[in-house]
Image (cartoon, rainbow, N blue to C red):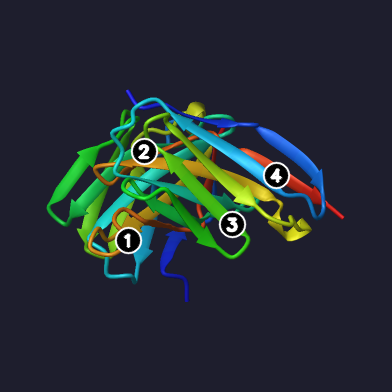
Protein backbone atom coordinates (compact mmCIF):
# COMPACT_ATOMS: atom_id res chain seq x y z
CA UNK A 1 0.00 0.00 0.00
CA UNK A 2 1.34 3.39 -1.02
CA UNK A 3 2.09 5.71 1.89
CA UNK A 4 3.02 9.36 1.51
CA UNK A 5 4.82 11.29 4.25
CA UNK A 6 5.60 14.99 4.47
CA UNK A 7 8.24 16.53 6.66
CA UNK A 8 8.16 18.86 8.47
CA UNK A 9 4.53 18.98 9.57
CA UNK A 10 4.84 22.69 10.31
CA UNK A 11 7.34 25.40 9.52
CA UNK A 12 7.59 29.05 10.55
CA UNK A 13 10.18 31.25 8.87
CA UNK A 14 10.93 34.95 8.35
CA UNK A 15 10.21 36.53 5.02
CA UNK A 16 12.94 36.15 2.39
CA UNK A 17 14.17 32.70 3.33
CA UNK A 18 14.54 29.91 0.80
CA UNK A 19 12.57 26.84 1.85
CA UNK A 20 12.57 23.13 1.17
CA UNK A 21 9.50 20.99 1.82
CA UNK A 22 9.91 17.24 1.68
CA UNK A 23 7.63 14.47 0.46
CA UNK A 24 8.45 10.76 0.52
CA UNK A 25 6.52 7.79 -0.81
CA UNK A 26 6.93 4.06 -0.32
CA UNK A 27 6.06 2.69 -3.78
CA UNK A 28 8.11 4.08 -6.65
CA UNK A 29 5.64 2.83 -9.29
CA UNK A 30 3.86 6.16 -9.59
CA UNK A 31 2.31 7.78 -12.63
CA UNK A 32 3.16 11.29 -11.54
CA UNK A 33 3.38 13.51 -8.44
CA UNK A 34 1.48 16.69 -7.75
CA UNK A 35 2.02 19.53 -5.29
CA UNK A 36 -0.95 21.51 -4.01
CA UNK A 37 -1.47 24.57 -1.90
CA UNK A 38 -4.40 24.83 0.53
CA UNK A 39 -5.39 28.08 2.20
CA UNK A 40 -7.39 27.90 5.46
CA UNK A 41 -10.99 26.93 4.82
CA UNK A 42 -10.38 26.76 1.09
CA UNK A 43 -9.98 24.12 -1.57
CA UNK A 44 -6.75 22.88 -3.10
CA UNK A 45 -4.86 24.70 -5.81
CA UNK A 46 -2.52 22.71 -8.01
CA UNK A 47 0.99 24.17 -8.03
CA UNK A 48 3.12 21.73 -9.99
CA UNK A 49 2.77 18.34 -11.57
CA UNK A 50 5.82 16.20 -12.30
CA UNK A 51 5.48 13.30 -14.68
CA UNK A 52 7.18 10.09 -13.63
CA UNK A 53 9.66 10.51 -16.49
CA UNK A 54 10.63 14.02 -15.39
CA UNK A 55 13.12 15.12 -12.75
CA UNK A 56 11.76 18.57 -11.99
CA UNK A 57 9.23 21.28 -12.77
CA UNK A 58 9.43 25.02 -12.19
CA UNK A 59 6.81 27.72 -11.84
CA UNK A 60 7.95 31.17 -10.80
CA UNK A 61 9.58 30.92 -7.38
CA UNK A 62 8.60 27.28 -7.03
CA UNK A 63 10.68 24.31 -8.09
CA UNK A 64 9.70 20.71 -7.51
CA UNK A 65 12.01 17.76 -8.00
CA UNK A 66 11.28 14.07 -8.21
CA UNK A 67 13.56 11.12 -7.49
CA UNK A 68 11.50 8.00 -8.05
CA UNK A 69 14.26 5.58 -7.15
CA UNK A 70 14.56 7.00 -3.65
CA UNK A 71 10.84 7.75 -3.29
CA UNK A 72 11.31 11.46 -2.73
CA UNK A 73 10.12 14.81 -3.96
CA UNK A 74 11.05 18.25 -2.74
CA UNK A 75 9.31 21.56 -3.19
CA UNK A 76 11.70 24.49 -3.15
CA UNK A 77 10.28 27.96 -2.49
CA UNK A 78 12.65 30.80 -3.23
CA UNK A 79 12.55 34.14 -1.41
CA UNK A 80 9.50 33.28 0.68
CA UNK A 81 6.77 35.89 1.22
CA UNK A 82 3.95 36.17 3.77
CA UNK A 83 1.53 35.36 0.96
CA UNK A 84 3.13 31.93 0.72
CA UNK A 85 1.64 31.04 4.12
CA UNK A 86 -0.58 28.01 3.57
CA UNK A 87 -0.58 24.23 3.86
CA UNK A 88 1.34 22.44 1.13
CA UNK A 89 0.26 18.95 0.13
CA UNK A 90 1.95 16.46 -2.09
CA UNK A 91 0.09 13.62 -3.75
CA UNK A 92 1.26 10.69 -5.83
CA UNK A 93 -0.86 9.58 -8.72
CA UNK A 94 -1.55 5.93 -9.29
CA UNK A 95 -3.90 5.15 -12.20
CA UNK A 96 -5.51 8.58 -11.80
CA UNK A 97 -6.15 8.20 -8.06
CA UNK A 98 -4.34 10.60 -5.80
CA UNK A 99 -2.77 9.47 -2.55
CA UNK A 100 -2.07 12.45 -0.35
CA UNK A 101 0.48 13.22 2.29
CA UNK A 102 -0.64 14.93 5.49
CA UNK A 103 0.81 18.28 4.49
CA UNK A 104 3.28 20.89 5.70
CA UNK A 105 1.75 23.97 7.31
CA UNK A 106 3.92 26.95 6.39
CA UNK A 107 3.88 30.35 8.03
CA UNK A 108 6.04 33.14 6.66
CA UNK A 109 6.18 36.17 8.92
CA UNK A 110 7.22 39.69 7.91
CA UNK B 1 -17.63 31.47 -12.13
CA UNK B 2 -15.79 28.63 -10.41
CA UNK B 3 -15.14 25.53 -12.49
CA UNK B 4 -15.99 23.12 -9.67
CA UNK B 5 -18.72 24.10 -7.23
CA UNK B 6 -19.97 22.38 -4.11
CA UNK B 7 -23.19 22.87 -2.20
CA UNK B 8 -23.73 23.42 0.61
CA UNK B 9 -20.49 25.01 1.79
CA UNK B 10 -21.31 24.35 5.42
CA UNK B 11 -23.76 21.93 7.00
CA UNK B 12 -24.67 20.97 10.51
CA UNK B 13 -26.76 17.84 10.97
CA UNK B 14 -27.71 15.37 13.65
CA UNK B 15 -26.75 11.74 14.07
CA UNK B 16 -28.96 9.47 12.00
CA UNK B 17 -30.00 12.07 9.43
CA UNK B 18 -29.57 11.51 5.71
CA UNK B 19 -27.77 14.27 3.90
CA UNK B 20 -26.53 14.89 0.38
CA UNK B 21 -23.55 16.92 -0.75
CA UNK B 22 -23.58 18.07 -4.33
CA UNK B 23 -20.83 18.80 -6.81
CA UNK B 24 -21.10 20.42 -10.22
CA UNK B 25 -18.40 21.15 -12.76
CA UNK B 26 -18.17 23.16 -15.95
CA UNK B 27 -14.78 21.83 -17.03
CA UNK B 28 -16.26 19.12 -19.22
CA UNK B 29 -14.24 16.43 -17.45
CA UNK B 30 -15.40 12.83 -17.38
CA UNK B 31 -13.68 11.90 -14.14
CA UNK B 32 -14.98 13.05 -10.77
CA UNK B 33 -13.94 12.26 -7.20
CA UNK B 34 -15.07 12.71 -3.61
CA UNK B 35 -12.51 13.08 -0.79
CA UNK B 36 -12.70 13.80 2.88
CA UNK B 37 -10.08 15.67 4.86
CA UNK B 38 -9.50 15.18 8.56
CA UNK B 39 -6.93 17.02 10.67
CA UNK B 40 -3.62 15.16 10.60
CA UNK B 41 -4.83 12.56 8.09
CA UNK B 42 -4.64 14.36 4.79
CA UNK B 43 -7.24 13.73 2.09
CA UNK B 44 -8.69 10.28 1.58
CA UNK B 45 -10.64 9.07 -1.42
CA UNK B 46 -14.27 8.07 -0.80
CA UNK B 47 -15.63 7.33 -4.29
CA UNK B 48 -14.69 8.11 -7.85
CA UNK B 49 -16.35 7.96 -11.24
CA UNK B 50 -14.66 7.80 -14.65
CA UNK B 51 -17.86 8.42 -16.56
CA UNK B 52 -21.62 8.55 -16.03
CA UNK B 53 -21.99 4.77 -15.93
CA UNK B 54 -18.90 4.10 -13.83
CA UNK B 55 -18.79 4.24 -10.02
CA UNK B 56 -15.88 2.95 -7.93
CA UNK B 57 -15.22 2.69 -4.22
CA UNK B 58 -12.23 4.48 -2.81
CA UNK B 59 -10.26 3.95 0.35
CA UNK B 60 -13.07 4.81 2.81
CA UNK B 61 -16.47 4.22 1.16
CA UNK B 62 -18.31 2.62 4.12
CA UNK B 63 -21.22 4.78 5.25
CA UNK B 64 -21.31 6.74 1.98
CA UNK B 65 -23.00 6.38 -1.39
CA UNK B 66 -22.75 8.39 -4.60
CA UNK B 67 -24.78 9.21 -7.66
CA UNK B 68 -23.46 10.42 -11.01
CA UNK B 69 -26.52 12.13 -12.43
CA UNK B 70 -24.74 13.58 -15.45
CA UNK B 71 -21.24 14.24 -16.67
CA UNK B 72 -21.27 17.50 -14.76
CA UNK B 73 -22.86 16.32 -11.49
CA UNK B 74 -21.63 13.94 -8.81
CA UNK B 75 -23.44 13.73 -5.45
CA UNK B 76 -22.27 12.21 -2.18
CA UNK B 77 -24.82 10.91 0.34
CA UNK B 78 -24.51 9.97 3.96
CA UNK B 79 -27.41 7.61 4.53
CA UNK B 80 -27.31 7.85 8.31
CA UNK B 81 -24.80 10.42 9.49
CA UNK B 82 -22.57 9.69 12.47
CA UNK B 83 -20.26 12.05 14.39
CA UNK B 84 -17.03 10.56 12.99
CA UNK B 85 -18.16 11.69 9.54
CA UNK B 86 -17.53 15.25 10.66
CA UNK B 87 -14.92 16.45 8.19
CA UNK B 88 -14.16 18.69 5.24
CA UNK B 89 -15.38 17.13 1.99
CA UNK B 90 -13.91 17.91 -1.40
CA UNK B 91 -15.06 17.15 -4.90
CA UNK B 92 -12.52 17.05 -7.73
CA UNK B 93 -12.41 16.49 -11.46
CA UNK B 94 -9.76 15.41 -13.90
CA UNK B 95 -9.23 14.88 -17.59
CA UNK B 96 -6.49 12.35 -18.32
CA UNK B 97 -6.18 13.72 -21.82
CA UNK B 98 -4.73 16.98 -20.51
CA UNK B 99 -2.29 17.04 -17.64
CA UNK B 100 -2.09 13.32 -17.09
CA UNK B 101 -3.81 13.16 -13.76
CA UNK B 102 -4.04 16.80 -12.72
CA UNK B 103 -7.07 17.17 -10.50
CA UNK B 104 -9.12 20.31 -9.96
CA UNK B 105 -10.79 20.76 -6.61
CA UNK B 106 -13.96 22.46 -5.43
CA UNK B 107 -13.94 24.79 -2.42
CA UNK B 108 -15.07 22.09 0.00
CA UNK B 109 -18.07 21.41 2.22
CA UNK B 110 -17.56 21.59 5.96
CA UNK B 111 -19.83 19.04 7.64
CA UNK B 112 -20.53 18.80 11.35
CA UNK B 113 -22.48 15.82 12.67
CA UNK B 114 -23.79 16.28 16.19
Q: Are marks 2 and 3 on the same chain?
A: no
Residue at 27 percent across and 61 percent down: it is B95
Q: Pointer 1: what residue?
A: B99
Confirm whether residue B8 shows in the render: no
Whether label 2 touches label 1, CB < 8 Å: no
Query: Where does residue A82 sit, x and y in percent of width and height?
Result: 78, 57
In front: mark 1 or mark 3?
Answer: 3
Q: Is residue A6 left or right of residue A27?
A: right
- Pick the quarter of the image with the C terminus of chain B: top right
Query: Where does residue B35 sit, x and y in percent of width and height?
Result: 40, 42
Determine which of the numbered discs, if any, sits on residue B51 in the image.
none
Compare marks 4 and 3 and give the one earlier in the sequence.
3
In terms of depth relative to the viewer, which is nearer, A96 or B22? A96
Where disc 4 sits, the SS reads: strand
In terms of depth relative to the viewer, which is nearer, B53 or A84? A84
Badge 3 sits on which subunit? A
Query: Where does residue B59 sit, x and y in percent of width and height?
Result: 32, 30
Measure the alpha-carbon separation of dots 4 and 1: 27 Å
Measure the alpha-carbon separation of dots 2 and 3: 27 Å
Badge 1 sits on which subunit? B
Where disc 3 sits, the SS reads: strand
Determine which of the numbered discs, if any, sits on residue A62 in the image.
3
In front: mark 4 or mark 3?
Answer: 3
Determine which of the numbered discs, if any, sits on residue A106 in the image.
4
Q: Residues within 10 Å of mark 3 (few under 14, many from 20)?
A: some
Q: Pointer 2: what residue?
A: B45
In front: mark 2 or mark 4?
Answer: 4
Whether label 2 touches label 3, CB < 8 Å: no
Measure the alpha-carbon separation of dots 2 and 4: 24 Å
Amino acid sequence: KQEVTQIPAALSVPEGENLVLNCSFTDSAIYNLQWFRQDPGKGLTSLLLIQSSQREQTSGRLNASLDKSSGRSTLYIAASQPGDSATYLCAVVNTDKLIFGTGTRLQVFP
Amino acid sequence: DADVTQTPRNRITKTGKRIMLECSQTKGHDRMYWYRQDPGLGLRLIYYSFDVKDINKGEISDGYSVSRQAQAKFSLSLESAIPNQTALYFCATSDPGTGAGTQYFGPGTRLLVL
